[in-house]
Amino acid sequence: MGWPPNRSGDFREATSHDEPNRRLTMSTGVDIAVNGDVATLTLNRPEKRNSVTHDMWRAIGDSVEALAKNSNVRVLIVRGEGHHFCAGADIGGLSDGVEGDYAQDNWRAEEQLTNFPAPTIAVVRGNCIGGGVSIALTCDIRIADTTATFGITPAKLGIVYPSNSLERAVRELGASNAKRLIFTGDIVDAEAACNSGLVHEVHAPDALDKAVDTVVATLLSRSSLTQTATKAMISEITASGSVSEATRSRWAPVPKSSGELDEGIAAFKEKRTPTFPWRRR
């Protein structure tokens, strides 16, 4: 499965001949835009505060899997259309429970986001509730504005929080913070979210986009090899406590063999910005 889709609706692999700026509006309420090295996934259901339907979970999983195979994409941004990030799972789709296909597609979407090989950024305005927090926590970097509010609310609905979402919340927030948020279902503001580690930066609403642009520019100026290898190894550490010998052996020779290290050293000596050559395959 690749990117972008062909006319039949299937996905194909992007190549160097593809247009650098592409936008796909999906009828499911998930929009994908690719602009050079940066892809943006937008939850586009603003009339429902971007609450996520079953079809949207499926579309998120499919589109992120495809983007992961596009070696040109170095940063993935996740955001919501309009004034809100995501008000959670569409409650209308939960009346039959959260098992079966729904649970599988929800799980897959979050795992595809978590395991995306390049850096990911959640950009949060307004409501970020329930499944919205689950989506945000899949992202490596989370940036909010002062309008953002956060809550993990299964206790208000009688839902047992999905185990993958719970594991992620504990990893990112710590057990104590995760317990408090989930036990109470309380809604917290952006400052409290930042203090708990739920977000990394908080900005005024009119400064949010510029702050995101600054982070993206910084990421693109750094070594994609360093970012990709580090993300893969951190994932192993959080899962098993250490980096496997196979992973160490895989990455150890790449800085030299790819020319990445030579370019970094040359740029440092010449006092210029490096143009790192490595791209994931």
Image: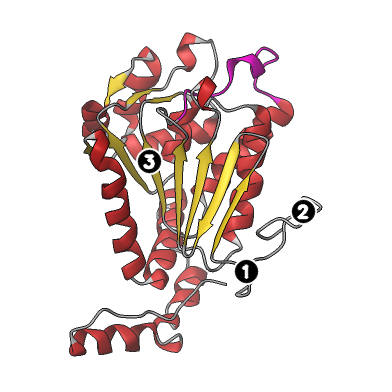
Q: Is residue 208 magenta?
A: no
Q: Is residue 195 above or below residue 223?
A: above
Q: Is residue 174 visible?
A: yes
In this rendering, the label closer to the viewer, 1 or 2? 1
Q: Is residue 200 visible?
A: no
Measuring from the top left, give residue 244's x and y in whole percent: 47, 65
Magenta span of residues: 86-99
Task: Give amino acid for label 3.
Answer: Val
Residue drawn at x 29%, y 83% as measured from the top left: 264
Task: Give amino acid for label 1.
Answer: Asp
Task: Give amino acid for label 2.
Answer: Asp
What residue is disc 2 on?
Answer: 10
Is residue 46 rendered to the left or right of residue 174? right
If the image is split into quadrants, where does the C terminus sit? bottom right
If the image is split into quadrants, where does the N terminus sit? bottom right
| Badge 2 vs badge 3, beta-carbon distance below 8 Å | no
Residue drawn at x 29%, y 26% as measured from the top left: 147
Q: Which numbered disc covers residue 18?
A: 1
Q: Secondary structure at mark 2?
A: loop
Is residue 204 rendered to the left or right of residue 135? left
